[in-house]
Amino acid sequence: MTITVWGIGTTRTFRVHHALHECGIDYETEPVRTRTVDMDRPEFRTVAVSGKVPSFQDGDFVLNESAAITRYVMTRAIPPRPVRAQAVIDQWCYFMMMELDATSLYVVRRHEGLPDIYGESEIAVSASKSYFDRQLTTLCDELLDGRTYLNGTFSELDILLISMLDWAAFVKLDIPGPAEVYADKIRERPAYQAAYRHNYGNRTR
Ligand SMILES: N[C@@H](CCC(=O)N[C@@H](CS)C(=O)NCC(=O)O)C(=O)O
């Protein structure tokens, strides 16, 4: 069955490409970029429930939301995890998606990167940067005690965190030392590098 990823060029689309590269899965890409006319394509609107990238198809199965797609790709071929082990992974997935992505990095994106749509706000941007720092420090204290992977072995948690650390670096946020060490190791992975080129082209961090 054909797997198709809709979307390239953003942190959220990168997660999906990274997961597929880590799993060595062949797939097709529809290179829809955010805030372009490509988003008006009827075929895209059929699969993208909120009209956003990334969107994902595995045969007739359609999935949206980057964290959900990443989890699906990373776990579709392995036995289900014990309930409590999965619950702890979910805890950190939700933490990263809410505390780092939605309420920190995306607020910076809105009020610094998209002022024509959301309005410019230095206060919102600086408060979000401080909040990011506080929440990332929490995650580092809990999960980054020198370990290479957040969950012991490489998992969807690593895909989410490295995508957010790259995003943070891109908007010139300070990254605590343990997170920098962690990020450098993940960035050495061939699958990360191939997915990065596929998603971002020759963009440098
Ligand atoms: N929670 C969603 C967010 C998706 C999202 O906001 N995508 C952006 C690009 S990174 C988008 O398509 N924006 C277009 C719009 O808001 O109209 C996810 O993680 O997949």
Image (cartoon, rainbow, N blue to C red):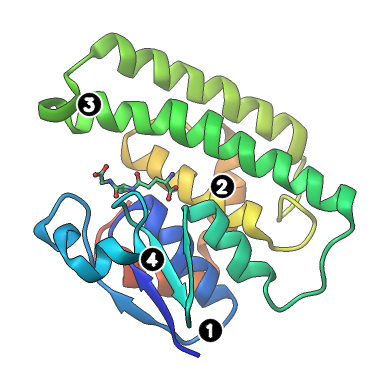
User: What amino acid is found at the position of numbered circle 1 in the picture?
Assistant: Ile
Which residue is under mark 3?
112
Secondary structure category for the residue under label 3: helix
| Residue 201 visible in the snapshot | no
Q: Earlier in the sequence, mark 2 or mark 4?
A: 2
Which residue is under mark 4?
196
Q: Is residue 75 above or below residue 145?
A: below
Where residue 80 appears, as percent x and y from the top left, is 82, 67
Secondary structure category for the residue under label 1: loop
Q: Nearer the viewer, mark 3 or mark 1?
A: 1
Residues at circles 3 and 4 in contact by the CB criterion of under 8 Å:
no
Q: Toward the viewer: 42 or 126?
A: 42
Q: Earlier in the sequence, mark 1 or mark 4?
A: 1
Secondary structure category for the residue under label 2: helix
Establish whether ligand 1 lies closer than 8 Å to the Cβ of label 4. Answer: no
The residue at 38%/72% (across/down) is: 5
Which residue is under mark 2?
161
Report the disc number at residue 25: 1
Asked if residue 168 lies left or right of residue 144, the reply is left
Quarter of the figure with residue 93:
top right
Quarter of the figure with residue 178:
top right
Q: Is residue 122 above or below residue 141?
A: above
Where residue 14 appears, as percent x and y from the top left, is 41, 60
Q: Nearer the viewer, mark 1 or mark 4?
A: 1
Where residue 88 appears, as percent x and y from the top left, is 80, 43
